[in-house]
Image: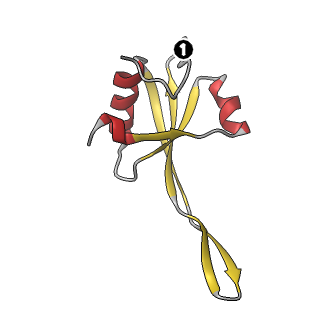
Amino acid sequence: MSLYTIIKRPVITEKSQRLELEGVYTVVISPEATKVDVRIAFERLYGVQVEKVNMITTREKFRNSKHGVQVKRKSRLKALVTLKKGQRIADLQKIKE
């Protein structure tokens, strides 16, 4: 699996912004990725040291309509990446060259 396909995009919510101040970054990752893959991707792409990686699988959300049940939101896999003390990522969109 390529390093560039593991991390899809950052999660931008109030909770994730608050966690970034503590050194925990939240990103949506590929469903096939493992904790080791995420750790290696962060260390190589952003040049930081990762302390731990937690993974969360969100479930699908459904909505009832007159045409039956429809999928409102697909399931996805998120990773909470904790960096070592003193480590920061200025911008998750930019990758270290």
Q: Viewed as shown, does residue 72 lie left or right of 94?
A: right
The spot of residue 39 in percent (x, y) is: 38, 31
Q: How crowded is the residue under tag 1: few (<14 C-alpha within 10 Å), some, or many (20+)?
A: few
Against 18, is 54 above or below?
below
- The residue nearer to you, when weighing 74 against 55, is 74
The image's colour scheme reads secondary structure
Residue, x 45% and y 25% (percent of image)?
51
| Residue visible at 49% across and 18% down in the picture | 84
Q: Secondary structure at mark 1?
A: loop
Q: Is residue 96 above or below residue 81?
A: above
- Name the residue located 63 percent from the left edge and 26 percent from the top edge: 20
> Quadrant where the C terminus lies?
top left
Q: Give me the residue at 46% from left, 35% from top.
A: 53
In the picture of the structure, the residue carrying the numbered disc 1 is: 85
Q: Determine the residue located farthest toward the right in the rendered image.
A: 14
Q: Quick check: 40 left or right of 20? A: left
